[in-house]
Amino acid sequence: MSSTPISLRGQVEPFHVMEVLKAANERARTHGDVITLCAGQPSTPAPRVVRDAAAAALASGEVLGYTDALGIPALREAIAGHYADTYGLTVDPAQIAVTTGSSAAFTALFLAAFDAGDTVLMARPGYPAYRNTLQALGCRAIELDCGAEVRFQPTVAMLEQWAHRHGTPRGLILASPANPTGTVIAAAELAAIARWCEERDVLLISDEIYHGITYGEDAHSAWGSSRAAVLVGSLSKYFSMTGWRVGWAVLPPALVRPVELLLGNLNICAPALAQVAAVAAFGAEGRRELDGHVRRYAANRDLVVTRLPELGVAQWAPADGAFYAYADVSHLTHDTLAWCREVLDATGVALTPGVDFAPVGTGRAELDGSRWFRLSFAGATADIDEAMSRLAAYVQSR
């Protein structure tokens, strides 16, 4: 009897946060006491104006069929207007591809720009789906150890050093604010990195999905320094529309047609209803509601940072933006995968182990994800406070 064949690319590493979320959902069914701090998503619905637009589109009887592979013109124009209003950048809507979440944007970009065997650099710790998707496509995802001394972000000096030793990479993925650390790259450093990439024909993919959620200096767009870069955006984070599955990429002209062809084959188009409704998210009414969420995230961030020492935590990432606290708990465990399971079983608080963001044994020991965990503070302030109390009591009891 023959076995079912499974390709090497099908044996991708798990996205551990999804495994934790599955366990948390099961505990919620059996115990009803879960506080979910593992998933990187807002606890609020889409803005009222977006929900109203979706309801109106459904009520109208409009046929919500396939759209152009690159998205409906109204949404591409709204996204272009967003860049003009937010960054003072002129973006041609023809260079914008609307995608099924930012995840589809990354997949299409990796396929369009890189061949199997190409080397793409990223930060460690960093978002695991970059690495896992690149590896599934046959690319070499190389992680640069980015510790507290460089604020958990790559620098031009690090890129120069790597290129001197190994040769010029094909691409670089940069995230600011970053997941899991929340760090924002200073404008001057971002500009220097963008210039370094453009001068060497290294494709810079700038993940800007957490833009709009910062607690000091605003995040800067890579197109402020180099039009050779690709920008990736999303309605999932600041816009509070995670499950609507709408993201986008802003592309240099040479990549527009390849990405269009790939999206048409892989996805056909992003969800039509979500695209129609999403146009309203960029208006003033929606932004007022969304900015209120950011003020709550800021309060939650201050609360978490104040209370982390109650867990004995002495080191955490700066959390300049996004809605995460990434903390070193090596005084409690050297296996946060097991520790997070134990915490969920004992307290009902769901946390994400750092092995998602810095796989065990792949770089500097002090950055090893077995020593760190990520906590999302995107929920209600009362829930965050209760979760921190449960965690403190658990740690103190041990």
Image (cartoon, helix red, strand yellow):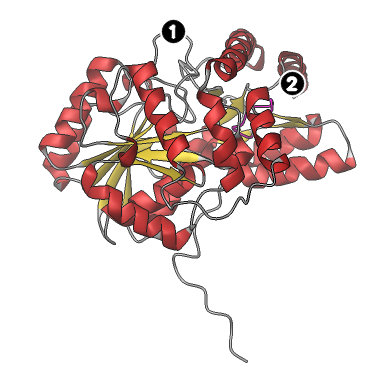
Residue 398's mark?
Answer: none
Front residue of 32/151: it is 32
Q: Give the range drawn in magenta.
A: 39-45
Question: What is the three-letter code of the residue carrying label 2?
Answer: Ala
Q: Can residue 146 be seen in this view?
A: yes
Residue at 51% x, 54% y is 13
The quadrant the C terminus occupies is top right
- Mark 2: few/some/many CA within 10 Å (<14, 14-19, 20+): many
Label 2 belongs to which residue?
A: 387
Residue 216's mark?
Answer: 1
Distance from disc 1 to disc 2, alpha carbons, whole Å, reads 26 Å
Q: Where is residue 130 in the image (x, y as percent from the top left)?
A: 42, 45
Q: In which quarter of the image is residue 168?
A: top left
Q: Where is residue 26 in the image (x, y as percent from the top left)?
A: 80, 45
Q: In this view, does 177 lie above or below 121?
A: above
Q: Position of residue 224 (x, y in %)?
A: 25, 22
Q: SS class of the residue under badge 2?
A: helix
Q: SS class of the residue under badge 1?
A: loop
Q: Is residue 165 above or below residue 385?
A: below
Front residue of 316/26: it is 26
